[in-house]
Image (cartoon, grey):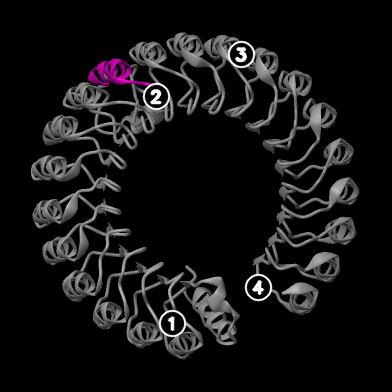
Amino acid sequence: MGDVGAQYFANALRHNMTLTQLDLGFNQIGDAGGEYLADALRHNTALTILYLYDNQIEHVGAKHLGNALRHNRTLTTLNLRDNQIGDLGAQHLGDALRHNTTLTTLHLFYNQIGDVGAQHLADALQHNTTLTTLYLGWKEIGDVGAQHLANVLRNNTILTKLILGFNEIGDVGAQYLADALRHNTTLTQLDLGHNRIGDAGAEYLADALRHNTALTILYLYDNQIEHVGAKHLGNALRHNRTLTTLNLRDNQIGDLGAQHLGDALRHNTTLTTLHLFYNQIGDVGAQHLADALQHNTTFTTLDLRENPVGDVGAQHLANVLRNNTIGDIGAQYFANALRHNTTLTTLNLGYNQIGDAGAEYLAVALGHNTTLTTLHFYHNQIGNIGVKHLGIALRHNRTLTKLDLGYSKIGDVGAQYLADALRHNTALTTLLLGWNKIGDVEAQHLGDVLRNTTTLTTLDLRSNEIGDVGAQHLADALRHTTTLTTLVLGFNEIEDVGAQHLGALLRHNRTLTTLNLDFNRIGDVGIQYLADALRYNTTLTTLCLWRNYIEDVGAQHLANALRHNTTLTTLDFRDNQIGHVGLQYFADALRDNMTLTELHMTERVMIYGDLGKIKQFVRRNQQRNKP
């Protein structure tokens, strides 16, 4: 767009009395464009949200925007991330915040702001009475900048969310912030991820958590915290009564650190979510966490992805799930705080080394568990035997609604076990089986189940080599299903024949809303089958055809379908071979289509002149179909 386009928008904003949100991100408007918009904001009395991210705005543009904020009385959110305003620009905005009485959210992520700029913003917060959210991530404010902000937090009673990730803050800066947290009574979320606070910094923050009564969310991911830091945080959790989410992913707490946290969870009564992704936790650490869950009464989410937890660790976790008996919806019981037992509803064990034995332990537990609703088991070493045990569990389990077995080794035989289980299961709504080499034969078994299922709404079978034959089996089955709404068949070597069967499905099916056929081999002939079906289909809202073999002729078929279809809202045909002619077909069709609100195309296609028309029609539809 550039500064000229920004000037046009600015002129319109001077007179517009209804537009409340404007997103001009990624448009290279620069300082000149920032000035035009700033001048408009002095007069506009409607706009509340303005996105100007990634626009090459420097300190001059920030100065103009700052001047506008002194007078504007309606803007509540300003997003300037990914620009280059620097310390001087931060000073201009800081000066403005001393006088502004409406802005509540300011995004300054990745703007080359250092400790000097942080000081200017901190000084402004001493006087500002409305800003509740400040994003200062991806800068270099360091310990000195952290000190300036900490000084403000001691007395500020407005700010509730402070994002300081990726800022080279060490243990000294953590100490300043910790001292502030002892006195602050309003900040509820603090993000210190990807800094360098280490064990010493964790200790400072942990001591503060013993006294703080406001903070509910604390992010400390990727901070070089080891078992000593985990010990201090664990001690804090024994006493803290407000923290609900603690994110420690990408640290090195190990089994000993997991033990410290596990001991704390026996006594903590408020933490609901703990992220320990990629922390060198093995079977021993898993045992400590599992033992803690036997006694904890509030925990709902535990993330242990990419830790070397094996079969033994899985057994310990499975033993916990046997005793988790708080009713059908564990989260509801937690929210009401009426029960005094375990409440785990989500367990993520992805990227571990759990094999068939570990799967069996968990399967036995699932037969008794009545609270777990989501189980992520992707990227493990589960084969047919492990899947057989999980299938047996699914026959009896009445609470698990989502099961992710992607990137396993279940193959044809394992898929049959699952299919047999689904005939009896009445709870599962989402089943993710991507990258499992299931093949066309077992696609038939799954299809047979889909004819009778009354609960499954989402099935992900991407990258399973089902081909045209498998697509036919699924399409035949889905003619009769009344529950499935999302079907993902990307990366499956489906060609025109498979598309023909899926097209026939779309003519009859009345429940499917999303069909993903990305990265297949569907050409113009196959697209014609799908397009013809879209003329009659009245339920599909999303169709993904990224990277197939579609050319201008196929584009014409899709475009003709859009003239008649009244339900499709999202169409993705990136990375096909559609040129100027095909693009023109879409432009002409969108004159009549009033429902398509998202159209995804490849950059190299966008060089043609009809792109402007297409974007115009899509924007028209977006405005027309706003709630």
Disc 3 element: helix
Residue denoted by label 4: 18
Disc with the residue nearer the chain's start (4 vs 1): 4
Residue that badge 2 annotates: 337
Q: Specify few, some or many for label 1: CA neighbours under 10 Å numbering under 14, 14-19, or 20 or more.
A: many
Image disc number at residue 594: 1
Alpha-carbon span between mark 2 and mark 3: 30 Å
Q: Tell me how far mark 4 sits from mark 1, CA to CA.
A: 22 Å
Q: Position of residue 46 (x, y in %)?
A: 70, 67
Of mark 2 and mark 3, the one earlier in the sequence is: 3
Q: How far is mark 2 from mark 4, CA to CA?
A: 44 Å
Q: Amino acid at mark 2?
A: Ala
Determine contact: label 4, label 3, CB under 8 Å. no
In the rendered image, residue 100, in percent from the top left (x then y), is placed at: 83, 51
For disc 3, the marked residue is 229
Badge nearest the viewer, 4 or 3: 3
